[in-house]
Image: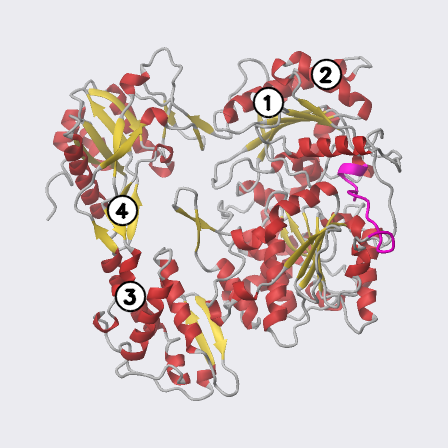
């Protein structure tokens, strides 16, 4: 059941059906693949892959435009420092969204009979579907980004209903959470509609000829805080309690069982319209005339007899009475299973935990090896802390190592202990404080158990204490929280989104009747601590034999556990990452002497956006193109492709009169140019230049932009290429300016580098560097480590450092194609004569190396000149290629400089 040998490690790469995981040996793929997956997944996955390859043929124009914007358009997010970073959705998120849209929009699936066509198992019948409306279940591993899937599908439903004639979708949404914890998480994303605007959910105005952002008018209503409700454009965010038409008792702090507060659908008690001014949300939703339902943590909807299902069914029946119907129901869950373990038959997309772990979307579970487990004994004692002392001690030791590692990086590692009974929570919490001074007063104990009556009355004081407990559990990741550990009875088995759990200790077993799955048990520790990084992270799992047996049962889902030595002062160092830091406390190093300061020079190359107004459309030097003739039928479909690639951006289908607004076409070209060239602003200057160019200088004669034949010509690939090449060259020539001089604006000092994590690779422990280790970089680590060893041994080298990204030393340069970019050299070296050298090591020649070296040489000259007033050092460059370095093996840095002369001389 191992992953396919060609399964990609990147979570952004398209996953072909032929390499997806399935629960059998690889040689059984041809015979068992379709039969062993959720019944609908195999066929849907294969057909969606084929549909994707066609450019979403058969989907509505709205769906095509949105899918292209989300998944085939580059998105750059502005960072705090003014830089831009690329935003991409995981392929798992893409496939989930595509699957829903393909079924609904391209294949017209509206009920269970439509879904039965995609059953690959031959074992599904219509009586297995309880609903009479379109319901699609998305299975995604914990931490894989289900909330983003929900936001994309809401936007799709909204715009489809708005733009597509006779659309049966909705612009009203009911987003249901199973409990107050999940509601808090969803609220953090949807409050202020921030997920729609912070993520690239909404296309730019003008994209595909629509004003998406202006047309997206949505009001958010949370729980009973309902503002003015319009006929359309409402998002109701609530837990399931608010949708009931009956009262449910409230929890109390005096209860032994607080699961009712954390897990059950409680919050402020709702009040009806007859008793005060608040709105009865359950009744209001039933009066809406168009509605789409989205369920988070949807494994709770596993029985048609449950109130959750009945509520949605009742809403549908109310709509039927008005000759309407529920538009769509989308459920997301990591574990959409019935109590008997059977998966929901409505499951159409599956991103299993084994794939999420392989792609570093979640943490890797790590278990103690056999030798470590053999050291653990269960003592005979009625006191839980004595009975399981070995297990608690091991958990604390693992947590200490984890805490020390992550503290250097600004993160607080959290210990999570599961016990068997609420009475033992306090005992274990107190015991942790006794054996670990760091945990004294830092253990949050939450009493929960599987059963217990909930009091119907509670004082305002007790309610405040409950709110405080909830707040504390949600804030434990942060440094403002004093807590570093949680003790509970499997508290918050879903929805509790603490990301910093690094060690789980299990002191309880679970039976098959407990309705708890191994993935739910591990789920609290699977979410990644660090984002924007593909570094591997781990969560250590230790516990009693019964607990470990239960956890290891997830191996039937393809998850393989790494088993490592644990425990003891000489315990193995955690290998989820290597921490690189400045050895400020090292007694064998003088950090002041080893530190190297690099001048932070003002940028030599800059973009001046105001220069876009100086573009001369009549003087771009382009070849003028002939106007191709097209029939009236051919002019009705206008296909636009990305200007810097072959992907279809969008298609415009003209109406029967052939009327189109050319402004949307010019807007497309303008926005694509700005996006591809990473220009922020300038649209107002670029748009009229493009209009004048297309109208008077693109073709062999001036054209009428209202002419459908001209519009059809604009969709031809050679036309897009001329527009792109002409304007890109002209924009780069106008906007990229070389100042001619550089001045010192400050200094980058190696000793000020913040600690950071990197993948566990080969490394050198240096004597002549401020860093604790020099870590090789990917495929080049052999050359880099060999070169670092040479520097560490060379007598004429005083100090050196690898130029990690965390150092922050990078140089702006102009690429061969004229675009502005940045370059990060490999090593920084100071010799005993005080000179500073910037070294580039290369295993193979790469594109733009001459441009990089020319710019690096210029930087060294500028830095030397700018440092003269302060009597600073001179700066030089050395280019070291692997072949020459291995053949000639220099014995000193001076001999290296003498022998490796490439790019040191003047460029031709």
Q: Which residue is mark 4?
A: 846
Q: How many angstroms separate mark 2 from mark 3 (CA)?
A: 69 Å
Residue interval drawn in magenta: 260-276
- Label 3 crowd bin: few (<14), some (14–19), many (20+), radius 10 Å: many
Asked if one can make out residue 100 in the rendered structure from this viewpoint, the answer is yes
- Label 4 crowd bin: few (<14), some (14–19), many (20+), radius 10 Å: few
Q: How many angstroms separate mark 3 from mark 4 (CA)?
A: 27 Å
Tag 2 and tag 1, C-beta contact below 8 Å: no
Helix, strand or loop for disc 4: loop
Discs 3/4, front:
3
- Label 1 crowd bin: few (<14), some (14–19), many (20+), radius 10 Å: many
Q: Earlier in the sequence, mark 4 or mark 2?
A: 2
From this view, report whether residue 390 is shown above or below residue 876: above
**609 falls in the magenta region:** no
Nearest the eye: 539 or 706: 706
Q: Which residue is mark 2?
A: 430
Which image quarter: residue 880?
Answer: top left
Tag 2 and tag 3, C-beta contact below 8 Å: no
Q: How many angstroms separate mark 1 from mark 3 (CA)?
A: 57 Å
What number is the disc on residue 727?
A: 3
Tag 4 and tag 1, C-beta contact below 8 Å: no
Q: Position of residue 163 (x, y in %)?
A: 59, 72
In this rendering, position of residue 79 left or right of residue 44? left
């Amino acid at each position: 059941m191992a992953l396919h040998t060609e399964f990609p490690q990147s979570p952004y790469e398209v996953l072909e059906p032929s390499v997806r995981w399935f629960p059998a040996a690889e040689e059984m793929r041809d015979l068992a693949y379709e039969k062993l997956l959720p019944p609908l997944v195999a066929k849907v996955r294969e057909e969606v892959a084929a549909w994707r390859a066609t450019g979403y043929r058969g989907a509505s124009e709205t769906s095509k435009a949105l899918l292209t914007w989300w998944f085939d358009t580059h998105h750059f997010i502005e960072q705090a420092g003014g830089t831009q970073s690329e935003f991409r959705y995981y392929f798992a998120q893409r496939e989930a969204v595509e699957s829903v849209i393909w079924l609904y929009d391209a294949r017209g699936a509206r009920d269970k009979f439509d879904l039965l066509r995609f059953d690959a198992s031959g074992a599904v019948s219509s009586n297995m579907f309880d609903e009479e409306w379109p319901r699609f279940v998305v299975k995604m591993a914990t931490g894989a980004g289900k909330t983003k899937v929900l936001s994309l599908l809401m936007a799709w439903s909204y715009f489809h209903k708005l733009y597509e004639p006779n659309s049966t979708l909705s612009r009203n949404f009911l987003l249901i959470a199973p409990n107050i914890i999940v509601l808090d998480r969803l609220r953090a994303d949807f409050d202020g509609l921030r997920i729609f605007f912070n993520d690239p959910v909404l296309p730019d105005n003008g994209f595909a000829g629509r004003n998406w952002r202006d047309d997206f008018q949505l009001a958010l209503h949370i729980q009973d805080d309902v503002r003015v409700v319009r006929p359309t454009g409402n998002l109701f965010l609530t837990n399931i309690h608010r949708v009931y038409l009956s009262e449910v008792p409230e929890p109390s702090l005096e209860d032994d069982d607080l699961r009712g507060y954390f897990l059950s659908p409680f919050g402020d008690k709702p009040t009806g319209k007859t008793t005060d001014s608040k709105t009865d949300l359950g009744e209001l939703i039933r009066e809406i005339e168009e509605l789409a339902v989205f369920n988070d943590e949807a494994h709770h909807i596993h029985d048609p007899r449950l109130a959750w299902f009945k509520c949605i069914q009742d809403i549908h029946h109310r709509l039927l009475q008005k000759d309407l119907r529920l538009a769509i129901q989308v459920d997301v869950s990591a574990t959409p299973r019935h109590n008997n373990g059977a998966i929901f038959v409505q499951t159409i997309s599956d991103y299993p935990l084994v794939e999420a772990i392989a792609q570093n979307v979640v943490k890797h579970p790590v278990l103690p090896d056999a030798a470590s487990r053999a050291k653990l004994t269960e003592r005979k004692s009625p006191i839980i802390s004595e009975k399981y002392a070995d297990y608690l001690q091991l958990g604390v030791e693992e947590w200490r190592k984890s805490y020390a590692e992550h503290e250097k990086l600004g993160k607080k590692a959290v210990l999570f202990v599961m016990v068997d009974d609420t009475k033992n929570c306090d005992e274990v919490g107190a015991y942790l404080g006794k054996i670990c001074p760091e945990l004294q007063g830092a253990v949050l104990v939450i009493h929960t158990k599987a059963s217990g009556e909930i009091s119907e009355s509670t004082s305002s004081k007790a309610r405040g204490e409950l709110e405080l407990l909830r707040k504390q559990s949600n804030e434990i990741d942060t440094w403002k929280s004093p807590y570093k550990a949680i003790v509970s009875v499997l508290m918050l088995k879903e929805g509790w989104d603490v990301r910093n759990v690094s060690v789980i200790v299990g002191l309880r077993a679970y039976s098959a009747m407990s309705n708890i799955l191994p993935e739910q048990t591990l789920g609290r520790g699977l979410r990644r601590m660090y984002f924007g990084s593909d570094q591997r992270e781990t969560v250590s799992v230790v516990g009693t034999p019964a607990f470990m047996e239960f956890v290891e049962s997830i191996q039937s889902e393809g998850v393989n556990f790494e088993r490592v030595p644990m425990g003891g002062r000489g315990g193995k160092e955690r290998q989820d990452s290597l921490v690189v830091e400045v050895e400020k406390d090292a007694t064998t190093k003088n950090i002041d002497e080893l530190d190297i300061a690099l001048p932070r020079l003002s940028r030599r190359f800059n973009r001046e956006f105001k220069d876009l107004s100086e573009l001369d459309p009549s003087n771009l030097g382009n070849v003028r193109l002939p106007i191709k003739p097209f029939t009236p039928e051919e002019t009705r479909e206008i296909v636009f492709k990305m200007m810097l690639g072959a992907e279809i951006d969008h298609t415009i289908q003209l109406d029967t009169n052939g009327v189109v607004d050319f402004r949307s076409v010019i807007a497309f070209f303008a926005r694509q140019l700005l996006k591809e060239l990473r220009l922020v602003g300038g649209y107002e200057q670029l748009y009229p230049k493009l209009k004048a160019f297309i109208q008077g200088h693109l073709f062999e004669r001036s054209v009428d932009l209202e002419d459908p034949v001209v519009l059809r010509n604009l969709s031809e690939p050679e036309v897009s290429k001329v527009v792109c090449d002409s304007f890109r060259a002209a924009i780069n020539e106008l906007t990229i300016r070389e100042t001619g001089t550089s001045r010192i604006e400050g200094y980058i000092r190696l000793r000020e580098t913040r600690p950071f994590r990197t993948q566990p690779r080969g490394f050198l422990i240096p004597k002549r560097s401020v860093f604790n280790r020099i870590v090789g970089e990917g495929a080049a680590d052999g050359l880099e480590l060999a070169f670092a060893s040479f520097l560490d041994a060379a007598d004429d080298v005083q100090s050196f450092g690898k130029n990690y990204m965390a150092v922050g030393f990078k140089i702006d340069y102009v690429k061969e194609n004229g675009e502005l970019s940045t370059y990060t050299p490999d090593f920084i070296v100071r010799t005993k004569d005080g000179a500073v050298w910037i070294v580039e090591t290369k295993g193979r020649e790469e594109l733009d190396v001459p441009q990089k070296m020319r710019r690096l040489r210029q930087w060294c000259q500028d830095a030397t000149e700018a440092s003269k007033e302060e009597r600073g050092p001179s700066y030089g460059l050395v280019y070291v290629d692997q072949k020459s370095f291995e053949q000639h093996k220099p014995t000193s840095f001076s001999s290296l400089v003498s022998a490796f002369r490439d790019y040191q001389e003047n460029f031709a």
